[in-house]
């Protein structure tokens, strides 16, 4: 296991002997045909969007069962929508960070590249990623609870709380997966297929405690892929990772990207 303490700040990041520390990871990535990424709330943390767990996490202040379950929604749709409206306002006021931007460039860098995210904030798409597999839905989409029709809505703040379906008048809900709900079967199946078939799997900015998403890197490892974790803190998958970098993704991904591109150029030239 290789650990690089880049979380100690920009000074340490600058002094780090990038070439020798990142060498083995770059070798693996440059030989890889298929690269898969799983991202979590941590990738958006440096954009200023709160994560769920940890000291400043949303679940420290808010109770998931009062805001992120279907029962809570049916009991008090206004309260639940007010919370989502507030979160939409925060997300809309933030920008993708350097980590999101590197990931958009990797779509072109690797022959097969797949991005799977647990995030509902849409920041990967705003950064420019084209193919994003969203395991937990998207906060910018509404779903009619009667007809199951999905529509995009980017109003900040929402014009009506709770919003209602234009066609049938039923309540609209956020198109996100709540506690106690199943993930979309085809999205999940595709994600497991991709994690089984890749050569390298990244786990970035996720506490790796929410299933089934947390199983994707382990599934990849079992199928023979190299697993690379990027997180300032250890997680339950750290022990199964081939490389675990104690780092912020917005700092570390640009360093890795720069080194990858330097080596690619060197190989060609
Ligand atoms: P968590 O809030 O559980 O975990 C965020 C992770 O990001 C933690 O492990 C942090 O250490 C790490 N982190 C913080 N800052 C970081 C940075 N700058 N760079 C890299 N990593 C950083 O978020 P998730 O793992 O995404 O589900 O949570 C999984 C699911 O739980 C979410 O999708 C959500 C939540 O309940 C639903 O809404 C269905």
Image (cartoon, rainbow, N blue to C red):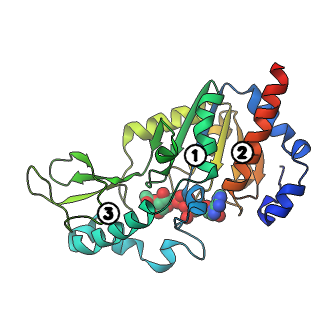
Look at the numbered disc 1 and give the secondary structure of its residue: strand
Mark identifier at residue 107: none
Image position of 154 (left or right of 247): left
Quadrant where the C terminus sits is top right
Q: Dot 3: few (<14), some (14–19), or many (≥20) neighbours within 10 Å? A: some
Which mark sits nearer the N-terminus, 1 or 3? 1
**How far is disc 1 from disc 3 in space, using C-alphas?**
28 Å
Of 88 and 55, nearer the camera is 88
For label 2, the residue is 228
Q: Dot 1: few (<14), some (14–19), or many (≥20) neighbours within 10 Å? A: many
**Res 90 visible:** yes
Image position of 77 (left or right of 168): right
Mark identifier at residue 156: 3
Question: Pointers 2 and 1 in contact (CB under 8 A)?
Answer: no
Residue 82: percent from the left, percent from the top? Answer: 30, 72
Residue 37: percent from the left, percent from the top? Answer: 60, 41
Look at the numbered disc 2 and give the secondary structure of its residue: strand
Disc nearest the viewer among 2 and 3: 3
**How far is disc 2 from disc 3 in space, using C-alphas?**
37 Å
Is residue 105 positioned above or below 40 on the image?
above
Image position of 210 (left or right of 169): right
Residue 199: percent from the left, percent from the top? Answer: 68, 30
The residue positioned farthest toward the left in the image shown? 168
Of 269 and 253, nearer the camera is 269
**How far is disc 2 from disc 1 in space, using C-alphas?**
10 Å
Residue 20 found in image quarter: top right
The residue positioned farthest toward the bottom in the image shown? 61
Residue at image location 48% in from the left, 73% down from the top = 59
For label 1, the residue is 38
Which mark sits nearer the N-terminus, 2 or 1? 1
């Amino acid at each position: 296991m290789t650990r690089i303490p880049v979380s100690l700040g920009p000074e340490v990041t600058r002094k780090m002997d990038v070439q020798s520390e990142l060498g083995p990871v770059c070798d693996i990535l440059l030989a890889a045909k298929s690269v898969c990424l799983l991202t979590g709330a941590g990738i958006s943390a440096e954009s200023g969007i709160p994560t769920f767990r940890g000291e400043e996490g949303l679940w420290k202040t808010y109770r998931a069962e009062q805001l992120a379950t279907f029962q809570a929604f049916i009991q008090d749709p206004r309260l639940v929508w007010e919370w989502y409206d507030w979160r939409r306002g925060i997300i809309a006021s933030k920008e993708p960070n350097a980590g999101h931007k590197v990931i958009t460039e990797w779509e072109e860098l690797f022959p097969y590249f797949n991005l799977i995210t647990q995030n509902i904030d849409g920041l990967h798409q705003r950064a420019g990623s084209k193919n994003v597999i969203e395991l937990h839905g998207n906060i910018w989409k509404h779903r009619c609870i009667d007809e199951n029709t999905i529509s995009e809505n980017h109003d900040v703040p929402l014009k009506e709380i709770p919003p209602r379906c234009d066609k049938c008048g039923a309540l609209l809900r956020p198109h996100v997966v709540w506690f106690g709900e199943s993930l979309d079967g085809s999205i999940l199946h595709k994600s497991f297929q991709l994690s089984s078939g890749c050569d390298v799997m990244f786990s970035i900015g996720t506490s790796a405690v929410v299933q089934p998403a947390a199983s994707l890197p382990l599934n990849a490892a079992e199928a023979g892929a190299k697993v690379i974790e990027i997180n300032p803190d250890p997680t339950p998958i750290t022990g199964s990772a081939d490389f675990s970098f104690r780092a912020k993704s917005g700092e570390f991904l640009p360093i890795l990207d720069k080194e990858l591109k330097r080596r690619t150029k060197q190989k060609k030239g």
